[in-house]
Image: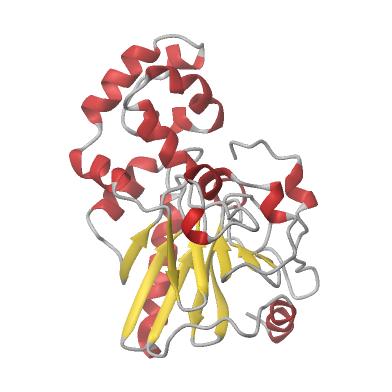
Amino acid sequence: MSRSLAKMFERGRAASAALSSGLRIYAVGDIHGRMDLLDELASLIQADLVDAPKETLTIFLGDYIDRGPGSYGILERLSTGDFPTAFLALRGNHEEMALKFLEDESVLEGWRKFGGLETLHSYGLDVGDAMRGKGFGAAREKFVERLPHRHRAFLEETPLSASYGDYFFCHAGVRPGVSFERQTAEDLLWIRDDFLKFAGAHQKFVVHGHSPVHVPDAKSNRINLDTGAFATSLLTALVLENADRRFLFAGNLRATSADFRFPTHRQDAARARAS
């Protein structure tokens, strides 16, 4: 990151947020079926470990599947633990929809409209009927049949949040004014405007994804790492160590120090809830 980019990010940070000494965390935004970007980011993290402290951890913020073409490959890699560091994979709203579809065929009516068909296709399903709003039961049966046990176990075991030091990690965000312990799954997976518009302090600094932005959106109380990988070809990781923060970018970072700006929540307000 250039010095000017670092200064811009510095203005958006909460200076008191830090991790305990000896720990480095890589927090990764929404991947959405972009196996190529996950592979590239893994290589970047591997190279970055040369000066790492004793303990390193990658936290994926959810939405591994849908939209992009590589959902199967991503779940195969993560479910087998194939990554340069130990990692914790949080659940996103897209994983939640996939899990619900395994039990209820009617879920496909909504899921197919925001990327579910790409996931089914990556498992070798013919999605022609589902595209036309038919054959949901047959699609569910075939998906259950073709989904490897380790993939399903991986999805089922994804937690909704994690907390390290002064940081709280989740997919979508938190309900302002509600303690972290009382947050609902609905909010952790789906919340948008009420969280994005809130400028006050949370219990901890929140690291999240879910609401696509062109570049990381850093505020005094949170940072959004969903840089819309499936559409922008840019996958972002935030590197946390002690009180320091920096980025790793996989893919096409078109922004320069001259045009790099942190978008406001208004740019996301018109996006569909299912993004």
Quick one: quadrant of the C terminus? top right
Examine the image and state in which quarter residue 202 appears.
bottom right
Vertical comparison of 4 with 57: above or below = below
Residue 224 percent coordinates (x, y)? 62, 61
Looking at the image, can residue 275 be seen?
yes
Residue 125 percent coordinates (x, y)? 33, 23
Left or right: residue 140 versus residue 193 is left
Quick one: quadrant of the N terminus? bottom right
Residue 210 percent coordinates (x, y)? 57, 50
Q: Residue at x 50, y 47 (%)?
A: 184
Left or right: residue 54 versus residue 231 is left
Choose between 80 and 193: the one closer to the eye. Answer: 193
Q: Residue at x 26, y 40 (%)?
A: 152
Choose between 87 and 191: the one closer to the eye. Answer: 191
Residue 44 percent coordinates (x, y)? 43, 72
Vertical comparison of 217 with 184: above or below = below
Looking at the image, can residue 69 be seen?
no
